[in-house]
Image: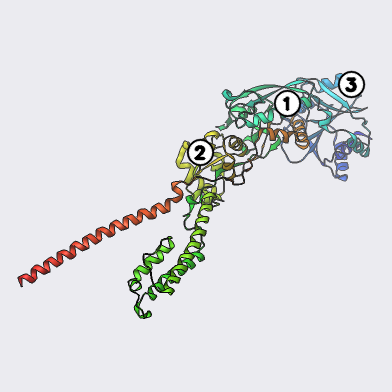
Amino acid sequence: MDTISLIPAFFLSKNIYFLTTFLCWNSEELHKLWRLGQQQGLRVRAMAAGPATPPLPPDDLHREGVVLDLACPYADHIIQAASETRGFNYRYAWLLLHNSSFDATSLDSVLSGSVILPDADVTFASDDKLLDVYRIKADQPLLATTLGVVRNSTRRDLEQMWGVLKSTVSRRKNLNNVFLKGATIITQPQNFKGWNDLTVRHIDTFPKLMYPLLMHCAEDLNFRLNLLQVELYGDERNGSFDGLAGMLQRRDIEVGVTTLFMRHDRLNVMHFCSETLELKGAFIFRQPPQSSVNNVFLLPFSRGVWAASALVFTAAGGLLAALSRPRWLRDADPDLVQLSAAEAFTFAVGTICQQGCYVNPHAVSVRMLMFFTLLASLFTFTSYSAKIVAILQTPSDAIQTIDDLTHSPMALGVQESTYKRVYFAESDDPATQRLYRRKLLPQGERAYLSIVDGIARVRNGLFAFQVEESSGYDVISKTFTEQEKCGLKQIQAFKLPMVAVPILKHSGYRELFAARLRWQRETGIMDRERRVWMASKPRCDSDGGGFLSVRLSDVLPAVQVLIYGMLLAAIQLFAEIALHRATERIKRKNKLRGKRE
């Protein structure tokens, strides 16, 4: 097989159907290559090799092939341009044609200064063999591995070779103990007591979680980390990032030993090599008692029961008033005759309140009416009292949505973090925007609290705290009683982006790290570290047992009724006094007028 036949066979065996060529062949050879590629479904694009060779962009959604004849003029310019623009990466499968037998010295000479890192797919094709070449690091020597096929191999031979050949990650997982620069986040150095300290899991949780995983990765890939420490994750200011993101933007480090949110603004200056876990943030709160959202004295009975009870006692009072009229009784009981309609109404109200009556009627029918009215009141009052006790001991379920939280009497707070305002402001959910404008913006900086302070206010009640769930649950598990854990509720205001390990943009180790971190996730290593460092929601082991103390706010409607009644009684008293004085004044005037006449 000649070189022209090798090129389509090589790339089609790798399932690549778009090819860019840098060849200095004559027009007949180029046309033959184009015709052969067209017949086999390979699109061929010829580029002129020269000092102004356009760079090969490393970002795209599909793989491409690139073939370069090293004997052509300006071949070294193309290699240099690909090295500077990270054209030697997994997106491009390179075939370098060398028209002589393999010689290690010539290989080093041709590719001297090239940046062909472990994620590259570069094949060096000499006359007698094909070799896979890469560097562990930019300043390390080239490593060449014979692929076991020769230049005149057919497409079927190449496909069989790729089928049995180990993956790139498996072939290049030994980085020969080189140093790679990394950085981690320690936001509160005064509280940092080591990577294995579990006493303050809610502080710098993700750097502590990712440190052992990256150490496993370093042991697996045989490299060492030159680790730096910074206090900020990185915010954008005038196009530049500070903190860890800024170090990646300036190419000061290779990898971040932590996780960052995968945001569009960060994707412009860094890449992410592997998702680690789903970060959940929510408003955590204790459901308020029923007395905070409803009048507990109206809840025991449904409207139908209230209406039926009112009808029964109204009918009893009316019947008693009717029986008290003398024309219904032949003996004209004097006690019963004195029971007026107003007194019958007072009896009905007193019966509802479990009060007796001062009247002692002689008529059996009236006694029976009073007895059964009092008995019905007893049953009703017993059911009412029992239901009141149950209501006072049971949290409400009034708050189920963001709008419920917005219109509730609960105060709100947010965890002090770098994204404390961003995701509220960027949320396109109208309910979240209403909550942010009505509950958080008016508070200003007072709305943002530490995790410990925020959870402490949640424990005191009538406070909802937006916090990363695992951090909040860690503090809750240490400070809440078992009964207090049973009333916890969370509502998600917005969905956080996935978090992933940040890495240098177009890093040559991105695929290696991604593959090994995925392996850790699939084998359970990542899940084990997650369970060590991320607290789960506390279980309610008390089954709602025990009793809660009744506060003044729980019986506030009763106190209000008493106060209103006292005020009405005082007003009625003054009104009666004023009416009495006015009546006496009129009587005196009439008497004086009569005497004068």
**Is residue 473 in sight in this rendering?**
yes
- In the image shown, does 257 or 588 lie closer to the viewer? 588
- Is 369 located above or below residue 238 in the figure? below
The disc placed on residue 237 is: none
353 versus 362 height, above or below: above
**SS of the residue under disc 1:** helix
Q: Quadrant of the N terminus?
A: top right
Residue denoted by label 1: 215
In the image, residue 328 above or below residue 375: below
Gap in angstroms between the C-alphas marked 1 and 3: 38 Å
Horizontal relation, residue 413 to residue 477: left or right: left
Amino acid type of disc 2? Answer: Arg
Whole-angstrom CA distance, mark 3 to mark 2, is 73 Å
What's the residue at 86%, 18% (across, down)? 105
Q: Which residue is mark 2?
A: 457
Quadrant in which residue 516 is drawn: top right
- Circle 3/circle 2 CB separation < 8 Å: no
Element under disc 2: helix
Quadrant containing the C terminus in the rendered view = bottom left
- Residue sitting nearer the eye, 192 or 211: 192
Q: What amino acid does circle 3 point to?
A: Asp
* Residue of label 3: 103
Give whichever of discs 3 and 2 has the lower sequence position. 3
| Residue contact between numbered discs 1 and 3, judged by CB atoms under 8 Å | no
